Amino acid sequence: MISRKLVADLALVCAVFLATAGIVEAQRTYNSYLDPAFIDFQLRSQTLATRIEDGIKSGSLKTDAGATLMAQLKSISTTPEDGKFNGQFNARLHAQLDKLSSSIDLQMSDRKTKSSAIQDIVAKKARIEAELSATPLSPIQSVILQKKLSRISAYELDLLSNHGGLSYWQRRKIMADLDLLESQISASRREISARSSSM
């Protein structure tokens, strides 16, 4: 027969174990919110929200289109379904932001003239150049990313010089290529931050 004392002791051990497991899981979740990749996600989310708000104020975004984009931004869940914060989950978050960023650019381009769209491309390239300068990349990474930016600029220049301008689809392709490059720079920055925090 199992004594009442043994049962009570086992119950106490189980209670302590469950309480400890809860504390560990809470600490793991807390640490996840301090992950450099998640912090970068929060910063990018705020940047996109500001772009949407500024676009509505300036008229480069229709009010209803801006409201839809803002709703899409807010709908991005920062809580994984399986409760596990990891690199794969953070990658999915940033992929959703990349897609939303492209949607914002496309909506704004639809509201602007070709001249204004070209100004957007110039501004985006300037932003990317600033990010390249500010990100402590390795020499190889820097050369690769700079070459990608140069190829995009050469393609744009060829169209402007030899074809008299950029069509809607050409502008869209250039902006998509710039979005991808910006995403790659962001990924490199997150990788560097993660390595630094693990040292």
Image (cartoon, rainbow, N blue to C red):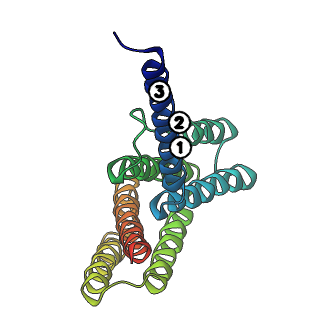
Q: Is residue 110 above or below residue 2?
A: below
Q: Secondary structure at mark 1?
A: helix
Does the rendering let one see residue 77? no
Marks 2/1: CA distance? 6 Å
Q: Nearer the viewer, residue 159 or 133?
A: 133
- In the rendered image, residue 28, in percent from the top left (x then y), is placed at 47, 50
Pointer 2 or 3: first along the chain:
3
Pointer 3 residue:
9
Specify few, some or many for label 2: CA neighbours under 10 Å numbering under 14, 14-19, or 20 or more. Answer: few
Pointer 2 residue:
19
Q: Secondary structure at mark 2?
A: helix
Q: Which residue: 42% across, 22% down?
A: 6
Q: Nearer the viewer, mark 2 or mark 3?
A: 3
Q: For residue 23, which numbered disc appears in the image?
A: 1
- In the rendered image, residue 95, in percent from the top left (x then y), is placed at 39, 50
Q: Are marks 2 and 1 in contact (CB under 8 Å)?
A: yes
Q: For residue 134, which numbered disc appears in the image?
A: none
